[in-house]
């Protein structure tokens, strides 16, 4: 019985030691989005953002886009120096981006970056300011069928304000 309790306590301690912080929330800016973050230790995370893109002049069309990035938290050992009750962190990462605008019959796929700063409150809540630039290939419906082009609007879009619950 003592061995069983020891093994059970050891298993519970190892699960608690390797439990990864996660956050779920919403992003606003250039469209409305949903965000999920999954931490890998204290210095890395996977960030998934699903959003509705808003293109200039085509507000009546709706679409769906997604960005997934692998981010490094406080890279290069540089931390934000003013930590009162909560904690400030900054992060940067790289990943992929893609989506489709249904009314315009166009889409895109490409490489994405992720840069941001966040404030983690002393309770399970965080605010962030993110920029997710992307560059890649765009497909657009034209009079002669589909046209392939360079997707440059993704570089200037993707600045969002995020609100997340940490669990």
Image: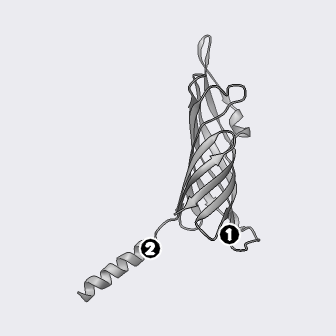
The residue under the point 68% across, 69% down is: 87
Which one is nearer the viewer's eye here, 72 or 54? 54
Residue lying at the far left in this picture: please name it. Answer: 1
Callout 1 crowding tier (Cα within 10 Å): few <14, some 14–19, many ≥20: some
Q: Is residue 1 left or right of residue 25?
A: left
In-front residue for pair 4/149: 4
Q: Using the image, determine if residue 150 lies above or below residue 1.
A: above
- 113 over 11 or under it: above or below: above
* Left/right of residue 78 with respect to residue 10 in the rendered view: right
Residue that protrudes farthest toward the bottom in the picture: 2
Circle 1 is placed at which residue position? 87
Instruction: Please provide percent x and percent y for residue 41.
Output: 54, 67
Determine the residue located farthest toward the right in the rendered image. Answer: 82
Quarter of the image where one finds residue 10: bottom left
What residue is shown with label 2? Answer: 16
Residue at image location 63% in from the left, 61% down from the top: 126
Instruction: Give the distance between the C-alpha atoms of the residues marked 1 and 2, in whole angstroms.
Output: 22 Å
Q: Looking at the rendering, which quadrant does residue 125 occupy?
A: bottom right
Disc 1, SS: strand
Which mark sits nearer the N-terminus, 1 or 2?
Answer: 2
The secondary element bearing badge 2 is classed as helix
Left or right relative to 165: residue 162: right
Q: Nearer the viewer, residue 166 or 154?
A: 166
Residue 21, image x, y percentages = 52, 64
- Point out residue 68 in the picture as x, y percentages from the top left corner: 56, 47
């Amino acid at each position: 019985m003592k061995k069983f309790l020891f093994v059970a306590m050891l298993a519970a301690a190892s699960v608690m030691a390797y439990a990864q912080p996660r956050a779920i929330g919403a992003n606003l800016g250039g469209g409305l989005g949903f965000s999920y973050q999954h931490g890998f230790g204290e210095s890395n995370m996977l960030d998934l953002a699903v959003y509705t893109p808003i293109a200039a002049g085509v507000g009546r069309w709706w679409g769906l886009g997604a960005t997934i990035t692998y981010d490094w938290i406080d890279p290069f050992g540089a931390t934000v120096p003013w930590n009162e009750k909560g904690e400030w962190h900054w992060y940067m990462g790289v990943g992929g981006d893609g989506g489709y605008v249904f009314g315009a019959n166009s889409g895109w796929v490409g490489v994405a970056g992720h840069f941001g700063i966040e404030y983690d409150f002393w309770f399970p809540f965080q605010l962030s300011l993110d920029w997710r630039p992307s560059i890649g290939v765009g497909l657009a419906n034209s009079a002669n069928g589909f046209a392939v082009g360079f997707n440059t609007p993704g570089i200037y879009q993707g600045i969002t304000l995020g609100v997340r619950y940490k669990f």
